[in-house]
Amino acid sequence: MSLFVPNRYRGKLIVVEGIDGSGKSTQISLLSHWLRSQGYAVAFSEWNSSPLVRQATRRGKKKEMFTPTTFSLIHATDFADRMESYILPLVKSGAIVCADRYAYTAFARDVARGVGRRWVRNLYRFAIHPNLSFYFRVPLDVALGRILGGRDALKYYEAGMDLGLARDVEESFRIFRAAFSTNTKPWRKRWGFTSSTPPCRSKSSNGACATSS
Amino acid sequence: MRKPQPLQFYSEPLPGVDTSDLQGKLIVIEGPDAVGRSTQIAQLRQWLEQEGHAVLDTGMARSALAGKGIKMAKEGNTLGPITMTLFYTTDFADRLENEIMPALRAGFVVLIDRYIFSIMARAIARGEDRRWIEQVAGFALAPHAVFYLRTDVEHLVSRVVLGRGAFDYWESGMDLRFGPDMYESFVRYQTRLIKALDSMVERYDFTLIDASQPIDRIFRELQRQIRRLQLLRVRPRRRLAHKAQA
């Protein structure tokens, strides 16, 4: 059974993935500006940004109410709303939709929190298959440096503090993100990302790789 | 699909959750909109408490996490079918982990007004993939009993018109416009819902209750069925004694 629904429409879906601080948001923003300047209709959708679901997610995070399962489900709900009311209609209409994070983020994150691998993948089966996926690889130290340079502290869930891996936030971030990378590794190839590290590294400093499918 | 024992997960164990110390009883009342579920639950609760049981009753969209969000989303009428399914599943998961399971650990009788079956039936009635939603909802605990209050659409229509005097937007499936007006959409949507629930009777061990009977007779039948479950009385947990010795 295929992972997602094939994109049979005129529009295209471009996805960037990578850990926090990998530079993917900066690049997708530059990319969408460039595409727009080339005369394409471009739309942008960010992970965890549905206006319908946002309040519930915010409440849950603020009060630290989430379990691995509800954390996974609320993000899938958010994704479903963006898919049903935004991404899909736009792709149908012929636009290029740029997505900052996609279902792969959930596959890696939720599994790192102990949620069943097959269960999470089934959860996102309604998503449309991206035409192009970029995976931003970056050493953990560089990512951490960028995050801490940009703002004061790591956020609770971003660092996987809910898992009780370590009492120190930075230490927890390192352990959690290492688990995250391990979880994505065997699947990157199957999901349509290239995993050929050396040529990609020589091309750019932040090590973005791309494939089309 | 294999049928799990009561208080075991259907197909997907919740991460980090131990079911071995669950000891209460989990009783589900299912059925379409306006069939009289909440009336029965209110009476059952009163009866069970008089009999000396600790009772928790819970129902859809009542979670601390997602209850408010669902109500707000429904007011906007912009809720897509998959989003709705997942929002209700989030709400259910939050109640399962934070209300239902703690109550079962403490030996409560938990009465649930609609379980995953209504979430699944609504998804199926809206054309979603059955296997998808069955797997998504697979982390639910198998209940001790599922009482399915069943009746036909004509009876539901008369209950809605007599009882409330108007059709509800969502109960009529107006988000997908099953018919040209609220009445026809209600009939078509509820027919699909009943069909979807009917298809689960054997698979999920539903006990059928004829909901076209008078309220008292339905109640007496539920009482008779629940007595057969041999509910435990509230009493100190034996496990605590073991731990104290160790």
Image (cartoon, grey):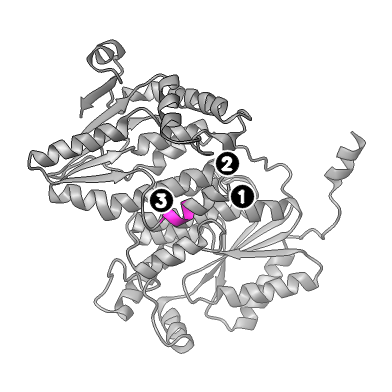
Q: Residue at x 39, y 70 (%)?
A: B75
Q: Residues within 10 Å of mark 2 (few under 14, many from 20)?
A: many
Chain letter of mark 3 equals A
Q: Is residue B78 above or below residue A128?
A: below
Please report contact status of discs 1 and 2: CB closer than 8 Å, yes or no. yes
Q: Quadrant of the N terminus of chain A?
A: top left
Do discs 1 and 2 share a chain? yes
Q: Which residue is mark 2?
A: B14
- Circle 1: residue type: Glu
Looking at the picture, tell me which residue is in the foreground, B11 or B62: B62
Most prominent secondary structure in the magenta stretch?
A: helix
Q: Which residue is mark 3?
A: A77
Which one is closest to the eye, mark 1 or mark 2? 1
**In the shown orientation, is residue B220 left or right of residue B82?**
right
Q: Quadrant of the C terminus of chain A?
A: top left
Q: CA distance from mark 1 to mark 2?
A: 9 Å
